[in-house]
Image (cartoon, rainbow, N blue to C red):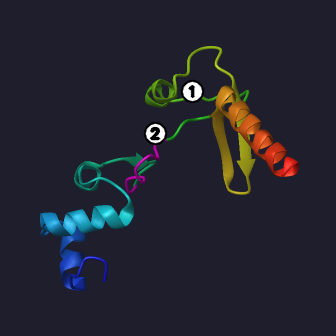
Amino acid sequence: MIVGVTRQSYAKWEQGDSVPDIEKCDKLAKFYGIKIDALMHYDEKVGNTKVTPPPEGKFLWGTVKMGSRGQIVIPKEARENYGLSEGSRLVVLGDLEGIALIPAERFEQQLRNAMEQSRKIVEE
C-alpha cells in the first residue's frame, strides 16, 4: 500500500465522496513525483480525457492541430518557458513512440558536452 488506505477509501476519493487528509496527500504527491498543489488543483484534459499531473519538471501544454503543410503552433506557455520566439531553431527528434522538439542551441551544447566527454575517455 502506498498511503495505507483501504480500497473503499480510495474508491470514495475517486468518486468525490471524500478527500484524503493532508498526510495522505503528501504521501501520494511524493509517490507520483508531483507537488500537493498539482495533486489537488490540476485539471488538464487531452481531448475529452482528464489526465494526471506530470511529474515535477515535466510539462503538458495540451494538444495542437497540424496544418496542411505540417505546421503546428507551439502553445504560448511552452514558448515562454523555453524562451522561443519567431525564428528560433528547433531540432526535431523522434522514436517509435512519437516526436519531440528541443531548442537547437541546447541540443548542440549537449552534443559538444558528449564529444568532450568522449575525448577525455579516449585520452585516458
- Image point 65% across, 42% down: which residue? 100
- Image point 69% across, 28% down: which residue? 104
Q: Amino acid at mark 2?
A: Trp
Would you place residue 33 above or below residue 72 in this image?
below
Q: Is residue 59 magenta?
A: yes
- Residue annotated with mark 1: 73
Mark 2 or 1: in front is 2
- Residue annotated with mark 2: 61
Q: Amino acid at mark 1?
A: Val
- Considering only order in the chain, which callout, 1 or 2, is on the residue closer to the N terminus? 2
- Residue at the far front in the pictured view: 124
Residue 102 in the image, given as x and y percentages of width and height:
64, 35
- Residue at the far right in the pictured view: 122
- Image point 68% across, 50% down: which residue? 98
- Image point 13% across, 69% down: which residue? 17
Residue 36 in the image, given as x and y percentages of width and height:
24, 55
Q: Which of 117 and 67 lies nearest the eye of the viewer?
A: 117
* Kind of element beneath mark 1: loop
Which quadrant holds residue 4? bottom left
Badge 2, how many Cα within 10 Å: few under 14, some, many 20+? Answer: few
* Kind of element beneath mark 2: loop
Left or right: where does residue 80 sit relative to residue 27?
right
Q: The magenta stretch spans which residues?
A: 51-62
Would you place residue 91 above or below residue 26 in this image?
above
Residue 7 in the image, given as x and y percentages of width and height:
25, 84
- Name the chief secondary structure element in magenta: loop
Q: How many marks?
A: 2
Badge 1, how many Cα within 10 Å: few under 14, some, many 20+? Answer: few
Which quadrant holds residue 109? top right
